[in-house]
Image (cartoon, rainbow, N blue to C red):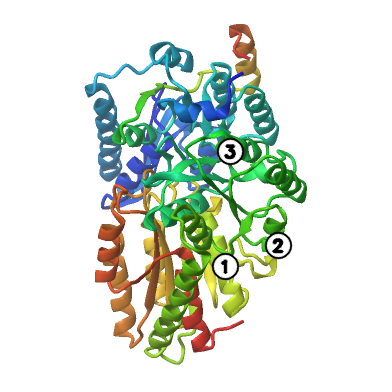
Amino acid sequence: MRKISDLFEQVLQVINIGLVSFKESLEDVGVKVIQVDWRPSAATDDETRDALQKLLGSK
Amino acid sequence: MAVKGILKEGEYYDSVTLMLVARDVLALEGVEDAAVVMGTDQNKSILETSGILLDIFKDAIDSDLLIAVKAKDEAICEAAIQKAKELLTSRHLKMQETGEYTPKSLEGAVDFLSDANMAIISLAGKYAGDEAMKALKKGLHVMLFSDNVSIETEIELKKYGKEHGLLVMGPDCGTAIINGAPLCFANVVNRGDIGIVAASGTGLQEVSTVISNEGAGISQAVGTGGRDVKKDVGGIMFIEGIKALEEDPETKYIALVSKPPHPEVLKKVASLIKTEIKKPVVGIFLGGDPKVVEGAGAIPASTLEEAGLIVSSLSKGKSMDEFKKLLEDREKEILNLAEKESQNKTATQKFVRGLYTGGTLCDEAMLISRTIIGEVYGNAPLNPQFKLEDSWRSKENTFVDLGEDEFTVGRPHPMIDFTLRNKKILEEANDKEVAVILLDVVLGYGSNMQPGDELNPIIKQAKETAEKDGRNITFVCTITGTDKDPQGRGKVKQQLEDAGALIMPSNAAASKLASYIVKNLGGVK
């Protein structure tokens, strides 16, 4: 069983989704980080978005 | 007056990038108003209120970029739009030039960085919850910076995290320090043996920097988001965070930082401390009864500074008497300084104006001031009867939290962008009743990188304005930060002192000094 405290023994490696400045700050202190080129789906009404996510199996 | 704009389909930028570009465009000569935003419904309604919602924007969707400019004439509008496009392109090119792979999805990122163990998510609230759950299901710990995530989603995420041994910091978690790395808005502090669990971002920043400046250090600092300790969430991550620190061999002492948790949550925390936690615990529940902390089996502190000093004393093997003496000496210095600063005021100068960027720091300042000068007005006052009718207009003793939503719509947070506070400082300096202006300056990653350069000329200008009118305004500042921060506490302190400000060692000390000056002048409620 994984525990939260296991994280404290590992090397921190980050996936950043959103503000690019957070990625830059982490790089500045030597943390390995990858930025996701996230953008909102073109389908913005919630109903269509939920339907799409169900179809794609991510919900 | 002319209004012009463009819509670019499918061109996405994060909100801070957009707001910083908008700020630069607004600063151009002849530009009255400008917006550089994604085409969300909320943004469209802001544009409508500002009178710059063009017809071409009405059918825009979240993934469309909107640039609108209101200016003296069409040529200025065109030039400003061109400038916005250039600024955005340069930002985009900077990313491309590094040649880094930027996957389009979390799944792609996990495939590429297979040892990733943490996801930091700062998307708009309506998207953030889904991405956080995806990250947890990939086995990643999560720091969820975004706000506007529903309480139901928060509970779902935290229950999942608890069941699977994963941290869920947030939503609305601005600060954490994990394995020595400052995440989002956090300071560069000494590494050490003190672990922190905090349901308050700037509270965590103040305590961790006091500890570091005392020569002690931080093992881990876990943020939970403020809502974690409310009844509905039930302290899920606050409790899991404490347990994780108990298990962590590097952590020898634990500090808890929060506004008073819901009584049921407090009961759970108390029971945990009594039954499972063997490490000494220091607790600051701002505005709560210290006896409650004591009852929970923890050492109570009455201010963020005191919490940092107590836990540092424990860590450094010093006696409690030493830290008590430090605080007593500090109190004497504050009283002497207050006496001196109240000598050079006119008969009309009686009041303090606290202009805060950190929410918890503002709360703490009001709690401390209340004991010295009585209730103060504000946009988020301790006593609802003292809520300002208009948050933009101070009266008598006023403490304003400029990070509240009413000030931040369409603007970067005041810790990043000083424009609004600078304007307020100059306004307050024109008020004949103002004796003291109290400011917080929060350093560290995420915050403004040149706070000294930006504040120094404003403080000088404000003091000069008052002096021309025969008044001397005392500027009292607290700097939450360390010399290891990218801005450097010592450098910023020097720059503010050069402008004539008094720099105190903590927010508690700054609030006390400001309040004692006002008390001496008779500005007591």
Q: Mark 3 points at which residue?
A: B246
Q: How crowded is mark 2: few (under 14 residues within 10 Å), some or many (20 or more)?
A: few
Image quarter (top left, top right, bottom left or bottom right) of the N terminus of chain A: top right
Q: What residue is rendered at 58% in x and 25% in y? A: A3
Sequence-wise, which precedes: disc 3 or disc 2? 3
Residue B482 appears at what percent x and percent y?
34, 53
- In depth, the one of A17 and B430 nearer the eye is A17
Q: Which-is-in-front pick, marks 3 and 1?
A: 3
Asked whether the residues under the numbered discs 3 and 1 touch, taking CB atoms below 8 Å apart as contact, a structural biologist would say: no
Callout 3, which amino acid? Glu
Q: How crowded is mark 3: few (under 14 residues within 10 Å), some or many (20 or more)?
A: many
Q: Mark 1 points at which residue?
A: B366
- Work out whether B265 lies above or below A17: below
Sequence-wise, which precedes: disc 3 or disc 1? 3
Q: Which chain carries label 2?
A: B
Residue A7 appears at what percent x and percent y?
49, 27
Q: Residues at marks 3 and 1, common chain?
A: yes
Left or right: where B488 falls relative to B117: left
The residues bearing labels 2 and 1 have C-alpha atoms spaced at a distance of 21 Å
Q: In the drawing, what numbered circle is on residue B291?
A: 2
- In depth, the one of B104 and B13 nearer the eye is B104
